[in-house]
Amino acid sequence: MAVLAQRNVSHSSGYRLRKVRNKVLFWAVLALFIVFACFPVYWMFITTFKEVNDLYNLQNNPLFFHLPPTLDQVRYLFEKTNFSIWVENTAEVGFVVVLITVLVCVPAAYVLARSRFPGSGGLSMGIFLTYLVPPTLLFLPLSQLVAGFGLVNSKWSLALVYPTFTIPFCTWLLMGFFKNVPKEITEAARVDGCSRLGAMFRIVLPVSVPGILTIVIFAFTLAMQEYVYALTFVSSSDEKMITLGVVTDLIRGDVFFWGSLMAGALIVSIPVAIVYNLFMDTFVRGITGGALK
């Protein structure tokens, strides 16, 4: 009995030791990921509010303030550049791109996901493959399209061009969501007298809000962060988007306005992070294609 009790104590002690070790390992890995995720935000924050003499002094530790924080870098961003105009341009172009993307993607994804016709499978795959074409191969033919519409050096040229890569990706993403919506509910709606279009608007779309919200977030994010097309089609500072304006107007030759650059990046990233966190559950459901079970 004594030997058995000793074995039980040894086994219990080993179990507790493994449990503590696994917990320590878990929190160590989690802390590593938290530091990895938060460090860029911290770097942007501390660079934004540093004085110039503190920022460029190589003898100072770049991770801490050695002089009192200042708002000079933020003032320079708003007073010496067209940052507010860039924000307005980004919001306007992003809204138009999202509107076009939703109006095209919802019916296209619904038809491809719920109907079967010759070539539907190949068309679905072709739509996604279109998204994979590099922008460097497309900006030459698209530049002719922009010139044909008379939109050279205009922010609205981007509203014309950006749907060429938001629509394929968002259509493919929304197709997977629509495929998970049970066909029984649409069939029941048809039995009750709804047309195919009525069933889509009254039944399918209300339960597909997570998927639609997901493509809205993706479309706006893709439009906001795109750089190649913006650099190609827009050169006037008053017509630039945030991504292009901050980089081109605050990097002049070999002079980098690091404080204002980080201020622009920080100010833009905060609203995006808030939106992603507010709609995190809906966004995850849309990404995973979850609907009714």
Image (cartoon, helix red, strand yellow):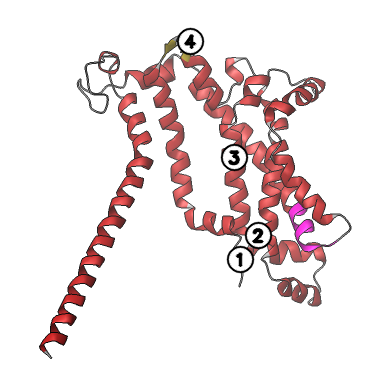
Give the labeled residue for mark 3: 220
* Amino acid identity at mark 2: Phe
* Amino acid identity at mark 4: Arg
Question: Which residue is painted at 61% across and 58% down in the image?
Answer: 209
Task: Please tell me how crowded label 1 is: few (under 14), some (14-19), or many (20+) other residues with Cα within 10 Å.
Answer: some
Whether the residues at callouts 2 and 1 have beta carbons within 8 Å, the answer is yes
* Residue 14 placement: quadrant: bottom left
Q: Secondary structure at mark 1?
A: loop
Give the labeled residue for mark 1: 291
Mark 2 vs mark 1: which is more N-terminal? 2
Which dot marks residue 252?
4
Cα–Cα span, label 3 and label 4 = 28 Å
Q: Is residue 124 above or below residue 134?
A: below
With 191 as the anchor, is 274 left or right in this view? left
Which dot marks residue 10?
none
Give the labeled residue for mark 2: 177
Location of residue 41 in the rendering, given as x and y in whole percent from the top left corner: 37, 35
Mark 2 vs mark 4: which is more N-terminal? 2
With 254 as the anchor, is 244 left or right in this view? right
Task: Please tell me how crowded label 2 is: few (under 14), some (14-19), or many (20+) other residues with Cα within 10 Å.
Answer: many
What residue range appears in magenta? 107-116
Task: Please tell me how crowded label 3 is: few (under 14), some (14-19), or many (20+) other residues with Cα within 10 Å.
Answer: many
| Mark nearer the viewer, 2 or 3 | 2
Q: Spot the residue most to the right.
A: 118
With 253 as the anchor, is 17 left or right in this view? left
